[in-house]
Image: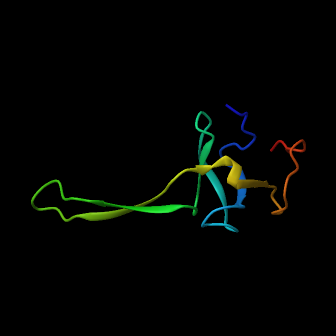
Amino acid sequence: MIKNKIKKGDTVKVIAGKDKGKTGKVMQVFAEMNRLVVDGVNKSKRHLKPRRSDEKGQTVEFFMPINASNVMLLDEAGKQIRHNKRVKL
């Protein structure tokens, strides 16, 4: 397991994959799997059946985790943070 420098609440930019170029805030971090969930990135849909006869089926949209190596940490101004220069907030 690699030590992850990205924490919940940080702003990141996607540098690889289908959402390349998008920026967002980190909502959740899975350190064991080296993955994180970024708001507005890697959106997925799930179709749910109705549970009761009087309900309707629905479509739920949510964000799937992406690999931490596919994102770049940004500061408040939107510029790249170098590896050893993490700013404490």
Work out which residue is located at the far top of the displayed protein and give it. Answer: 1
Task: Provide residue 48's location: percent of width, then percent of height.
Answer: 27, 58
Taking 56 as reference, is 39 left or right?
right
Q: How is the image coloured?
A: rainbow
What's the residue at 65%, 56% (across, down)?
25
* Residue depicted at x 9% and y 59%: 53
Front-lying residue, 31 or 74: 31
Q: x and y percent of residue 49 in the render?
A: 21, 59
Task: Say which quadrant the C terminus sits in.
Answer: top right
The image quarter containing residue 56 is bottom left
Residue 66 vertical position relative to residue 41 in the rendered view, above or below: above
Give residue 7's position: percent from left, percent from top. Answer: 69, 42
Q: In the shown orientation, is residue 7 left or right of residue 35?
A: right
Question: Looking at the figure, which quarter contains the N terminus?
Answer: top right
Which quadrant of the figure has residue 84?
A: top right
Q: On the image, which quarter does residue 20 sit in? A: bottom right
19 sits left or right of 53 in the view: right
- Identify whether 71 is placed above or below 58: above
Residue sitting at x 60%, y 47%: 36
Q: Nearer the viewer, residue 87 or 89?
A: 87
Residue 50 vertical position relative to residue 10 in the rendered view, above or below: below
**Which residue: 71% across, 55% down?**
71
Q: Position of residue 44 (x, y in %)?
A: 45, 61
User: How many labels sit on residues?
Assistant: 0
